[in-house]
Amino acid sequence: MNVFVVGGSGKVARSLARMLSQGDHAVRSLHRKLEQARELAALGAMAVQGDLTALSIDALATLMAGSDAVVFSAGAGGAGMEVTNAIDGRGLELAVAAARQAGIRRFLLISAFPDALRGGERNPGFENYARVKKLADAHLVASDLDWVILRPGTLTDEPGTGRVRAAAAIPYGAVPRDDVAATLAAIIERPNVSRTIIELTSGDTPIDEALARISQR
């Protein structure tokens, strides 16, 4: 398959590009900084330079053209409310519109676990982040695309185990970024996992088995 990754320079997105490329998929990774291109190319992806906050729908649709699926992995990364609104909010809406214009049906979104950081301080920036992420989820769900929303728990840099806990609602927990990427790669290869929201943490179930259970519901 041809997969277009928005936010291709992120850690999960880089792992995903490597896994998909090793699986003989073609990956194009949208990135903002020129110096990120070499690293993405080393992972097997075609680096596509572009600023999500500056691209028009037409321009992004042109970059996406010919893809079988879009993965939206972009995020503000705590850079402030304005950037959160621009990337996690308007950026997602732009990508959805561009995918529709480019005729791409399959759209995967990495979102946020509802309980993320709820044990910490409830500052205005976090509350805005939670609000924007929920509205982005709702925007995608309301579209006519073949969507999947993945809500991972706290992301870690530990090596992936290939075993997860995945369902529509699960207790909060952590999950290695590599296992998030592996789950995304497996979803891309499972078209019967469709129009569903999946919460994801580390667990005891192999990823393929966990997704098989979801696809049967």
Image: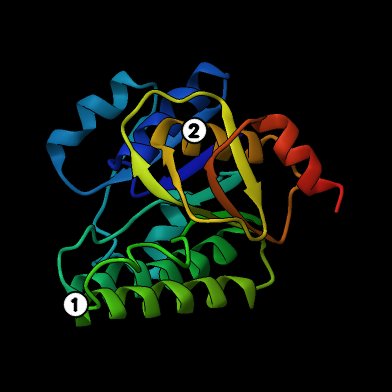
Residue 65 position, x and y percent, is 52, 49
Residue 99 position, x and y percent, is 54, 60
Please state the total of marks drawn on the protein image: 2
Judging depth in this view, the residue of 187 and 41 nearest the camera is 187
Q: Is residue 129 above or below residue 39?
A: below
Residue 125 position, x and y percent, is 21, 77
Q: Give the numbered dot on residue 179.
A: 2
Describe the element under mark 2 as helix, strand or loop: helix
165 to the left or right of 89: right
Q: Residue 65: in sight, yes or no?
A: no
Describe the element under mark 1 as helix, strand or loop: helix
Quadrant placement of the N terminus: top right
Judging depth in this view, the residue of 30 and 23 nearest the camera is 23
Q: Quadrant of residue 24?
A: top right
Residue type at mark 2? Answer: Asp
Label 1 packing within 10 angstroms: few (<14), some (14-19), many (20+): few
Where does label 1 land, which residue?
A: 82
168 to the left or right of 122: right
Quote the CA–CA distance across marks 1 and 2: 30 Å
Q: Residue 28: in sight, yes or no?
A: yes
Residue 63 position, x and y percent, is 41, 50
Q: Quadrant of residue 8?
A: top left
Identify the mark nearer the N-term, 1 or 2: 1
Residue type at mark 1? Answer: Glu
